[in-house]
Image (tube, rainbow, N blue to C red):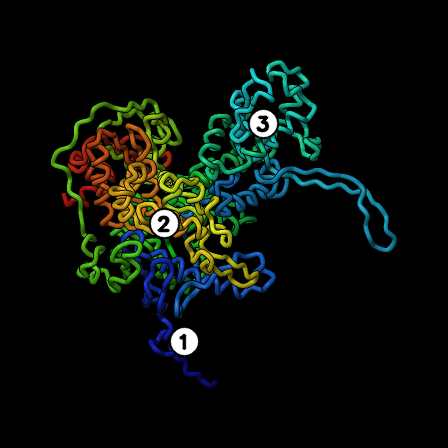
Amino acid sequence: MSSVKRTDPRAPGSHVADGHDLIRVLGARENNLKDVSVEIPKRRLTVFTGVSGSGKSSLVFNTIAAESQRLINETYSAFVQGFMPTLARPEVDVLEGLTTAIIVDQQRMGADPRSTVGTATDVHAMLRILFSRLGEPHIGPPSAYSFNTASVRASGAITVERGDKKAVRATYQRTGGMCTRCEGRGTVSDIDLTQLYDDSRSLAEGAFTIPGWKSDSQWTVQVYAQSGFVDPDKPIREYTERELRDFLYGEPVKVKVNGVNLTYEGLIPKIQKSFLSKDKEAMQPHIRAFVERAVTFTTCPECEGTRLSEGARSSKIGKISIADACAMEIRDLAEWVRELDEPSVAPLLTALRDALDSFVEIGLGYLSLDRPAGTLSGGEAQRVKMVRHLGSSLTDTTYVFDEPTIGLHPHDIRRMNDLLLRLRDKGNTVLVVEHKPETIAIADHVVDLGPGAGTEGGTVCFEGTVEGLRSSGTSTGRHLDDRASLKESVRKPTGALEIRGATTHNLQGVDADVPLGVLCVVTGVAGSGKSSLIHGSVPAGADVVSVDQSPIKGSRRSNPATYTGLLDPIRKAFAKANGVKPALFSANSEGACPTCNGAGVIYTDLAMMAGVAAPCEDCEGKRFQPAVLEYLFGGRDISEVLAMSVDRAEEFFGTGQARTPAAHRVLERLADVGLGYLTLGQPLTTLSGGERQRLKLATHMGEKGGVYVLDEPTTGLHLADVEQLLGLLDRLVDAGKSVIVVEHHQAVMAHADWIIDLGPGAGHDGGRIVFEGTPADLVADRSTLTGEHLAAYVGA
């Protein structure tokens, strides 16, 4: 026998292929990046830090991850690429050493009413297969347990084209698990007719009270008035039974209105198609307010909210139906699955156990599989997306995370850190955009961007180890070991908001007196019931301003000026000074450049290749017609004003000829939340998560209300920005407002006048108040997880 001498493949430098251990970025210029060049080690955990808006996401997501995805897309056939989004090459000179990028971002999961935690993670699919094999009585294939699949029956003649063509009789049947009453939604809607029309009026007198339906010339109104089914001059309350039935529930039918063929349909199905089929969160505010006023959603009486047909609910394994399994907390479901012993489905049970254990391991054991995906917070959604990657066999992959600790209690952050290290130890490159010092501390490599935000950022201030960052003198390095101290004296409450017997979600009959006139922080581990207590129990009224975590929706035409309403007083001021219409000073209206339609750039779709955007040659990116730019206000045209930063515009509209108090008030609020560096016309699509959160806060600060409810306002904030936020909260309280903050950040807890701590655990282990009192008492008591972490934070 001959022996072969083998080279140890793990020996350093044993092969030329082992030399590619870096991701090299040269000359990155996406958004505000200024020719950034970095070298990122592979198979290591690299954390990107810097103030909000410094360019972290531009470097990690818009450059490295975007190019990796674009290159992978180009490996598919031209036919497949035709169905995929076209991605432009990032603005960068050189990108070397890229690997396949898997992005786990903060984007909320789809708010489709039929999307749940189970369907979003494929766990529900495995459960359906399990019940189709083991469920008694057996009702059919996996589709029979799916609330997204309707039962179908059909029979008739079909022509089989072989030899002599002849028609044969055929029947088709598919068993689905969808509840026929609610169509798999779990809720049924009831429409309040008094919100749709005034029955004392006729259609000719403008009976409709639906937004956009009040004009007599509106086509929809004319269809009803000229349909011939009802008398347009008769008050609705005087309709006969048949007229009312046709008016409310009439089947679609063609009618002629002013010589045009249109479709007439009863009012109720029309409203259901026009409004109820859409995502409520995506509606315009006045439409959403109408839907909330006119439509009440109640649990489906037929399926009791399970979304499933009677057959699917009747099939059980032991005493558990698939509806019961989906309603369990995932950690309890994991225990139930572990007890099942059936050799015929052993591989399926193993995969199901692993998936459920991943939920528990990642800190989401308190969720249930039937939880609507749209109700998950940004942090929860990101961790649900992580579940599918934990058991993955892939290695040498780049995982990109966007602030994975969002929404996590300090107790849970340690668990998240362990997961990030596990992904790295499998041989993956892990890139994390993060502000929390606990996660920065575990990094193998740190890239700190700054020194400021917006135009003042976009450069690499430091690259190296965590210890090097501490002594680097950068903003992140200086604030890394910052610790807020407990207040020596706290404010006295001026009253209390009484909550009695709260049972929303997992709350267990909670009684609480939330103090008013002070800074009150509601805290507890993720899933303990904080948001349920405040958002579910504090009455939403004229005196309560609530700033939740729902994302800002805006296209590339939206900017801080349009979102905050700042553009309205600016347009009016320009119009008044020049004696013309305000619409001329809107890039989305009459003043828009006709070539680019006010976008400032020309978008060219190159079919199979990546689309390109080039500045409009006619308006040079200014978005307005040349004639509009001749109108000046305070010596500036409208495009020059929109190019100003918030700080510069605050000075411009605060004094002199351009003094505009209405605009100045909005700009003051934007500066108060630390957005002084943003330009007024910057597209919302270019803002970071932290910037969007603060933009929303600034907008809500303009509302009149005595009680402010803020849900995790430190989301996306750099350590240095948290100080500014605390100053803002203090100013609100000192101005006579009551501020209630749902928060995990220890600096905010230490700064509070009063703390309400929920727990002790999550899900059914939570839902109780475990502490009420001052931060000093919580630290001295140390009886809760929050107390232990806060004591360690302040060094007590």
Say left or right for 787 vs 383: left
Say left or right for 269 vs 654: right
Asked if residue 377 can be seen in this view, the reply is no
Residue 734: % across, % down: 19, 32
Outermost residue on the left side: it is 488
Identity of the amino acid at label 3? Asp
Identity of the amino acid at label 2? Asp
* Residue 707 or residue 326, whichever sits in front: 707
User: Label 1 belongs to which residue?
Assistant: 17
**Of discs 3 and 1, which sits in the foreground?**
3
User: Label 2 belongs to which residue?
Assistant: 637
SS under mark 2: loop
User: Label 3 belongs to which residue?
Assistant: 216
Above/below status of 149 relative to 84: above
Measured Cα–Cα span from mark 3 to mark 1? 74 Å
Residue 397: % across, % down: 42, 62
Answer with mark 3 or mark 1, whichever residue precedes in sequence: 1
**Among the 4 quarters of the image, the one containing residue 786:** top left
Outermost residue on the front side: it is 579
**Among the 4 quarters of the image, the one containing residue 139:** top right
